[in-house]
Amino acid sequence: MTKQPYLIFLFAVLLLFVQNGFSQGVIYSSDKNDHNEKVLEWRKQKDATYKIKEKTMLTDELLEDFEGLNYYDVGYSYRVEGQLTKFTDGRTFAIQTTGGQIYNYLIYGQITFTLNGKSLTLNVYQSQRSAKSGDKKGALFIPFTDKTSGEETYGGGRYLVLDLPDNDTLTLDFNMAYNPYCVYNPDHSCPIPPKENRLEAAVEAGELMYP
């Protein structure tokens, strides 16, 4: 991934989290209306950030006509709680990227959850740097594909980034699922979701394909 634009964008995103109390992957609100309003506000601020040349992930060509990213309607039913099984044996997984690089992640655990009546499981990853630093904010990474991938959403999958939980319950808010940056600019190198994270369900929430 091109480093300077990425770091500028990341700093801007972190500022939004501090100002609004958002996690990178979940809105901390159990009230449906409040949750939905905060998701919409998050999207509005993200779109505004993407319009700034120094902070955007878009190519110059896409930026010219950019009005906002494409999203599914907010659906509270896509905010689900799951049971997290943590792995403490230090097992790792080599995640490949679209640019041909390989990065070793810790397999933090597996989360089992129910979505639209179907029981599903995803592997949860943590970068080794995050594990060493002890950071809790945005420490967990879930790349996934689902039955919308290659149709309504990007064929290479989408991502969730979550905070470290205080217990064995982890909230997944698929309304916050976002596209890899290589969707908007081929210069970026993006992690490819492993086959273990191919969901046999349609996750009709979060970001749609763009443009």
Image (spheres, rainbow, N blue to C red):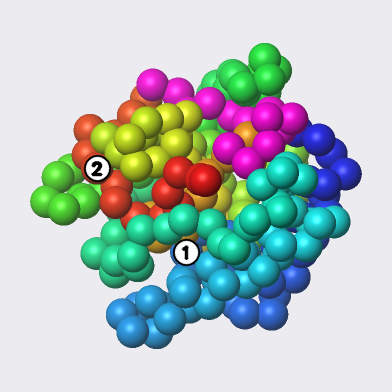
Q: Is residue 128 left or right of residue 148?
A: right
User: Which stretch appears magenta?
Assistant: 183-195
Q: Is residue 168 visible?
A: no
Say if 67 sits above or below 108 in the image. below
User: How many residues crowd mark 2 within 10 Å: few (<14), some (14–19), many (20+)?
Assistant: few
Query: What numbered label is drawn on residue 26?
Result: 1
Q: Which residue is mark 2?
A: 202
- Look at the image and tell me in which quarter the N terminus lies: top right
Q: Residue 191 appears at what percent x and percent y?
A: 59, 29
Q: Amino acid at mark 2?
A: Ala
Most foreground residue, 135 or 189: 189
User: How many residues crowd mark 1 within 10 Å: few (<14), some (14–19), many (20+)?
Assistant: many
Q: Is residue 141 magenta?
A: no
Q: Amino acid at mark 1?
A: Val
Q: Is residue 140 visible?
A: yes
**Which element carries disc 2, helix, strand or loop?**
loop
Residue visible at 67% across and 15% down in the picture: 100
Say if 38 sits above or below 128 in the image. below
Residue visible at 34% across and 42% down in the picture: 152
Most foreground residue, 150 or 100: 150
Residue visible at 47% across and 74% down in the picture: 40
Q: Residue 124 appears at what percent x and percent y?
A: 47, 39
First along the sequence among labels 2 and 1 = 1
Q: Residue 196 appears at what percent x and percent y?
A: 37, 25
Q: Residue 47 appears at what percent x and percent y?
A: 61, 64
Say if 151 sits above or below 95 in the image. below
Q: Is residue 190 magenta?
A: yes
